[in-house]
Amino acid sequence: MQPFRRFDRATYLLIGLLVVSFALTTLDVRGEQSGLGEVLRSGAQTVFSPLQKAATAVTRPVVGFIDAISNFAGLREENERLRQQLADLQAGVQEVEELRLEVELLQQAAGLDVPGDLAAVTARIFANGVTDFDRVRFISRGSDDGLAKGQAVIDARTGGLVGIVDQVADDSARVRLITDTRVGVGVRNLTSSETGWVEGRGSDPMQLEMFSVAEPVTEGDLLVTNGSRYPPDIPVGVVLVSAEAEAGFGLFSTVRPIIDLGRLDYVKVIVGWSPLDAALDNDGDEVVPNPSVDLE
């Protein structure tokens, strides 16, 4: 009997739901805008409208964020393009600046007063020595331009002594710097007119030796060539330490080159002067030039 009663209840429930559904459908069709269905739809809209607004409020920033990401990607590409353009412009400006400096150096070299109005050839340094211990520079002129061993080389900008030509090819030459240990320069102190000898010491300051002198040297004194091995009155260096002559020992000090030999660019090779030109002084007396460097 129990199973039969459960079946009747389920049947009654199903029939009741069907009747209610049919009644609601009939009311919705007949009632037009005022039907129960409309009321239910209005109620549903009232209930779900805040939820829709909340969903819109939540999704709108997300959509905006996605759009922003897309725009950001485009802006990044544009930024990279502008960066490249800026780099190209900066490279162009740097190139123009280098050309301007090169022209300026050439103009300075062309207008430099070589001691005694001697003939000179302008050359550019295109290479250094193989190692930092090689105190040499290679220049873009050679024997085809009148260069020969033993010629003095000066800085095209300042006129300071750079070194001496010690090897020559047809279209290039090697210059040994005055800081090389094998190079020596006869000098004269512009302050006292006393003469002496300066020798290279590599990376250390050059050494000044003066014998049979009466006057001391003072820090800052300018030394120029004395006209024995190099043309006269070329700036060589500045005295670093004041010193006085010691009886029987002479005078010793240190000297800083007048130019920065590490930043050379253009030089002038004096081709219109030879040490033999200094073999006779103005009175016809023989002058023995000081040796400078072994060029063999």
Image (cartoon, rainbow, N blue to C red):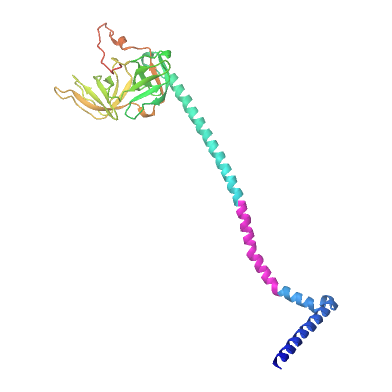
Which residue is at a point 60% across and 54% down the rendered structure image?
69
Q: Residue furthest right?
A: 30
In the rendered image of this protein, does residue 185 appear above or below residue 76? Answer: above
The residue range painted magenta reads: 47-71
Main secondary structure found in the magenta portion:
helix
Question: Position of 58 compared to 23: left or right?
Answer: left
Q: Nearer the viewer, residue 182 or 153?
A: 182
Q: Residue furthest bottom?
A: 1
Percent x, y of residue 136? 35, 24
Percent x, y of residue 249? 16, 23
In the rendered image of this protein, does residue 98 appear above or below residue 291? Answer: below
Q: Quadrant of residue 280?
A: top left
Question: Position of 12 compared to 264: left or right?
Answer: right
* Residue 176 visible in the snapshot: yes
Q: Nearer the viewer, residue 272 or 25?
A: 25
Q: Nearer the viewer, residue 169 or 90?
A: 169
Q: Residue furthest left?
A: 248
* Residue 260 visible in the snapshot: no
Q: Is residue 256 magenta?
A: no
Which residue is at a point 62% across and 57% down the rendered structure image?
66
Q: Is residue 50 magenta?
A: yes
Percent x, y of residue 51? 67, 71
In the rendered image of this protein, does residue 237 appear above or below residue 49? Answer: above
Question: Position of 240 compared to 81: left or right?
Answer: left
